[in-house]
Amino acid sequence: MERLQDTVLVLFGVTGDLARRKILPALYRLDRSGLLPERFHVVGISRKGTTAEEVVSMIASSAPTEDDAREFRARFADRVSVVGMRIDQPGEYEILSRRLAELDRAEGRPLARIFYLAIPATLFPLVAGRLSESDINDKTPPRQEARFLIEKPFGHDAASARALVDLVNSRFSPSQVYRIDHYLAKETAQNILAFRFENPLFARAWNGRHVSHVRITAAEEIGIEGRAAFYEGMGAFRDLVQSHLLQLLALVTMDRPASLAAADVHRAKEELLSRVMPPSPDRMRAETMRAQYRSYRSEVGNPDSLVETYAACRLSIDSEKWRGVPILIRTGKALREKVTEITLSFADPAIRGYRNDLTLRIQPNEGIVTDLRIKKPGFESECEEVQLDYCYRERADAAPEAYERVLYDALRSDQTLFATGREVLECWRVSEPILKAWATPGFPIHEYETGSWGPEAADLLAADAGTRWLDETHRVCPIRFGP
Ligand code: BG6
């Protein structure tokens, strides 16, 4: 493991949902695995009167035993502090600046600074502006330039995303900005490139000459979990497709990058995303669909809501490699079970009526499975379908959780698994025509039962493209009980 610079992590939104569910547990696990810098401090920003002890306890609550939690609290007691400030008040950034200077003095050298903006996206422009104006963003050597971690959504539409990218570019250098898309940091998403490019058997056939369809599903069992205000302003397409699922599509269809260095990976992804096409205006009703689970409107208290909790679309890629291949993407809340997977169908005109489906299961029960046809043992020459699979869970070495990876990569200044401004804008270019079509009066919104696999309209969309969504009969790395 490389030696990390001694660092202070400034966490805006330290008492928020994201910090509690993902960031603080990830900090605990990094510490437990010995992956934090030798000298490491956390400064939480809060206006709620939260104390440092409370933050330490929140981190320690991820400990497996009470003894571990006690040991952590003792060790971190003087490494965590809280700055109570109102983030819209320019004068109050002085308080933060003083705290950071105190830490530098206490450590006898300038600490590297990471600012994690785990706050509602509407506040980014304000906080980014204030931080860039203050001496907190000091880049004079020997100080390392500060790093800024920001969470999706990056804008609400193409125009606001452009404004955000411009603002960030005008205030910070690209090397300072880490746009988090936590799907990129999932172990199995990272494996996509390795699998594609390290296996000649697949590397050769990974294109539209051999692949008839690409399908991406991100189903969630949970609903909107009480986040009515957030979700009413968002919807399934903006929440999952515009960001996570287009990023997965890029990983699965981009050209081999010149190297695995961040700049080369980003270049290849940007190039691919620039070629992804939404349906033409006259095909929007046939190639996109949206739906709501039945109890959604009463749950958000808006009987007229047209916000979708389910979205499906058919995209295409205008490149020599992928032209003509239907790309089917769907996501939904309150579905039968949680599963994210990508399936490529390998087809050959000489072998009619059968395709080899290759599924990359991103989560849960991570793994890879290929459907094959083999001869059924016996006197007849019948064939049967079997599956060849590789399941990660059979390994002892646990993969880091996505937010551990996000934090660790930020600590070591590795931007490979973060999204660039151009990627974000390309994803909006693809998404905006669909969202605009959905905003036109009379565009249908379907309904589905909680706990189902979604509405029939989504099945028709897939059937129209000559395929079908995989359902629960297609099990990748199922949990096997017993010996
Ligand atoms: C987030 C969305 O980006 O991803 C949530 O805002 C969604 O609505 C979550 O539930 C899903 O992430 P994961 O890692 O649980 O698949």
Image: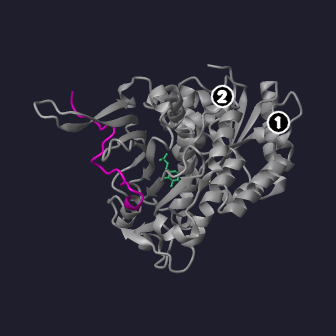
Q: Is residue 364 above or below residue 230?
A: above
Q: Is residue 57 visible?
A: no
**Residue sitting at 52 percent across and 68 percent down?**
284
The magenta segment: 463-483
Residue at the disc numbered 2: 259
Q: Main secondary structure of the magenta part?
A: loop
Mark 2 or 1 closer to N-term? 1
Mark 1 surroundings within 10 Å by alpha-carbon count, few (fewer than 14), some (14 through 19), many (20 or more) = some
Q: Residue furthest right?
A: 140
Q: Is residue 384 visible?
A: yes
Query: Which quadrant would the N terminus be assigned to in this image?
Result: top right
Compared across the picture, whether 369 is left or right of 329 comes to left
Q: Of the residues shown, which amino acid type is indicated by label 1?
A: Ala
* Near-viewer residue (68 or 177): 177
Compared across the picture, whether 38 is left or right of 193 comes to right
Tell me if residue 474 is in the magenta stretch: yes
| Spot occupied by residue 173 in the image (x, y as percentages of width and height) | 81, 42
Helix, strand or loop status at disc 2: loop
Q: Is residue 111 above or below residue 278?
A: above
| Spot occupied by residue 256 in the image (x, y as percentages of width and height) | 60, 33
**Residue sitting at 53 percent across and 64 percent down?**
235
* Near-viewer residue (278 or 416): 278
Identify the disc placed on residue 101. Answer: 1
